Image: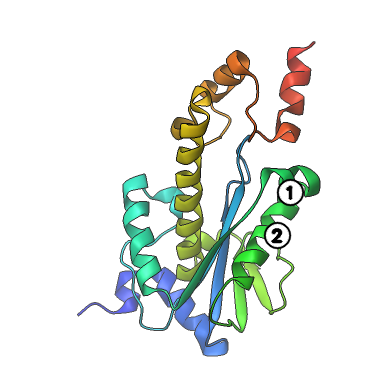
């Protein structure tokens, strides 16, 4: 029988954290970089002994694998919550503050109370529990990796729905990121109602020169 250690150092990391913080959540976001759409965040509490094989930083997984892991994380997590901050909030607050707000909403939405939080990156959200930031945490902690998968899959699904509503921009192909195709569609059709205009200022300014 495999042990947690044999399966993944991410679960080993979480096991060490539980020695000091028996119930903690991992937090991550998805969608800070795109030119369009809401920013997503997720918070996940995994109990000791839970193993999700193949779990890793969502960016290192195929879309198919992320979708498979999404269902397993949802079924095995003690608690999880996926939350967003809107394009309007991104424009009003800036993308960093909006991402931190989405993280706060994810933690607030948990139906089990964590005593500690591990947050991917180097910025801590405005939550009432103690915790720490972990740079490249989605490749370090199983709980953060689980949150990264939930946030990424949820945002990708949201962008596919946006593609049905606004088909000209082909959001299903680039998920809002600044690809060559995306800029071509912007040149052809202009911005959609879900584009982050603050992200496009430099692009449009450069085109006017």
The image position of residue 68, as x and y in percent, is 31, 56
The residue under label 2 is 101
Q: Quadrant of the N terminus?
A: bottom left
Instruction: Please name whichever residue, 196 or 5, is drawn nearer the observer in this view of the structure.
Output: 196
| Element carrying mark 1 | helix
Q: Residue lying farthest front?
A: 165
Crowding around mark 2 (Cα neighbors within 10 Å: few <14, some 14 to 19, many 20+) is many
Name the residue at 52% across, 89% down.
19
Name the residue at 58% across, 46% down.
31
Asked if residue 87 is positioned above or below residue 152 in the image, the reply reads above
- In the visual, does 173 lie left or right of 193? left
Q: What is the spatial separation of the Cα atoms under label 1 and label 2, in whole angstroms?
A: 9 Å
Instruction: Name which quarter of the figure residue 142 lies in.
Output: bottom left
- Give the colour scheme of this rendering: rainbow
- In the visual, does 87 lie left or right of 25? right
Q: Residue lying farthest top?
A: 209
Asked if residue 34 is positioned above or below residue 189 in the image, the reply reads below
| Element carrying mark 2 | helix
Asked if residue 132 is positioned above or below residue 201 in the image, the reply reads below
The image position of residue 188, as x and y in percent, is 59, 13
- In the visual, does 153 lie left or right of 191? left
Q: Are marks 1 and 2 in contact (CB under 8 Å)?
A: yes
Instruction: Answer yes or no: is residue 122 visible.
Output: no
Name the residue at 64% across, 62% down.
103
The image position of residue 66, as x and y in percent, is 37, 53
Name the residue at 61% across, 84% down.
115
Instruction: Please name whichever residue, 175 or 157, is drawn nearer the observer in this view of the structure.
Output: 157
Front: mark 1 or 2: 1
Q: Residue lying farthest left?
A: 1
Earlier sequence position, callout 1 versus callout 2: 1
The residue under label 1 is 89
Instruction: Answer yes or no: is residue 59 visible.
Output: yes
């Amino acid at each position: 029988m495999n042990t947690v250690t044999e399966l993944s150092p991410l679960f080993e990391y979480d096991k060490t954290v539980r020695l000091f913080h028996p119930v903690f959540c991992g937090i991550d976001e998805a969608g800070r970089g795109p030119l369009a759409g809401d920013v997503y965040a997720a918070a996940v509490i995994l109990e000791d002994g839970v193993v999700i094989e193949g779990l890793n930083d969502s960016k290192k997984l195929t879309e198919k694998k992320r979708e498979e892991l999404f269902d397993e994380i949802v079924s095995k997590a003690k608690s999880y919550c996926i939350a967003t901050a809107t394009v309007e909030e991104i424009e009003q607050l800036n993308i960093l503050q909006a991402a931190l707000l989405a993280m706060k909403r994810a933690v607030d939405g948990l139906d089990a109370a964590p005593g500690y939080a591990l947050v991917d990156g180097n910025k801590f959200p405005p939550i009432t529990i103690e915790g720490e930031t972990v740079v490249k945490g989605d490749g370090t902690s199983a709980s953060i990796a689980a949150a990264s998968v939930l946030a990424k899959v949820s945002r990708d699904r949201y962008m596919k729905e946006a593609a049905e509503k606004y088909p000209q921009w082909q959001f299903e192909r680039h998920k809002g990121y600044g690809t060559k195709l995306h800029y071509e569609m912007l040149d052809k059709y202009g911005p959609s109602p879900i584009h982050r205009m603050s992200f496009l200022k430099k692009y449009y300014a450069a085109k006017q020169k």
